[in-house]
Structures are given as C-alpha cells and as structure tokens.
Amino acid sequence: MSPVMGRWRWCLASMELIRDSLSEELVKMTEECEKLRSEVALLPRIKAELDALKVRHSAALELMGERDEQLEELRADIVDLKEVYREQVNLLVNKIQKGSSINVD
C-alpha cells in the first residue's frame, strides 16, 4: 500500500469518526429539541394557571386585609365595652355604698 493511499484511508477513517460523532450529536440535539417543543406546548396552560393563582392570591390578600380590619374594630369594641362595664360597675358600687350609708344613719 502506498503512503498516499494510507493517508487517504486515515483521512477516511477520521472523517467517518467525525461523521459518527456528529450523527450522535444530531440525535441528542433532535431529542432535546423535541423535549423543548413539548415543554413549550405546556407553557400556555401553565401561564393560565399562574394567572389564576395570581387572582386567587390577590383575592386572599384582600380578604385577609378585610379580616384584619374587622379584627381591629372588634378589639376596639371590646376595649370600649370593658370601659362601659367598668363605669357601670363603679356606678352600681357607688349606689350600693350610698344606699348602705343612708341605711346606717
């Protein structure tokens, strides 16, 4: 075999290795592309779910805010009622004390 022929065979073998390597890479890239296409197909549904969750989250935050306001109002009402009851108890105690001091005389 001549040196030129050996060189051509070596080049051919090298090219075949490169071809096989590129062929494998092409298969992998095609699979990756198909995977990405299927994931892209899911995006509209996922976006719609995200939008729905954002609406629910916003509504929940609004309800929590309203609940917190009601809670603060109820706490203020309790403070007011305690004060009213204290005043009434003090008035009753004073009436009882006045009534008992009048009966003692």
Image: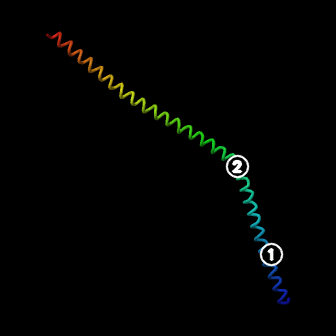
Spot occupied by residue 102 in the image (x, y as percentages of width and height): 17, 11
Residue 97: image quadrant is: top left
| Front position in the image: 72 or 35 | 72
Instruction: State the count of labels.
Output: 2
From what the image shows, is residue 79 above or below residue 59? above
Spot occupied by residue 89 in the image (x, y as percentages of width and height): 28, 20
Q: Amino acid at mark 2?
A: Leu
Distance in Å between CA atoms under marks 2 and 1: 39 Å
Q: Is residue 24 left or right of residue 87?
A: right
Q: Amino acid at mark 1?
A: Glu
| Front position in the image: 6 or 68 | 68
Spot occupied by residue 56 in the image (x, y as percentages of width and height): 59, 39
Q: Residue at x 66, y 44 (%)?
A: 48
Marking on residue 36: none
Tag 1's secondary structure? helix
Residue 77: image quadrant is: top left
Q: Is residue 3 left or right of residue 90?
A: right
Which residue is denoted by mark 1 in the rendering? Answer: 16
Which residue is denoted by mark 2 in the rendering? Answer: 42
| Front position in the image: 21 or 97 | 97
Q: Quadrant of the C terminus?
A: top left
Q: Is residue 10 left or right of residue 97?
A: right
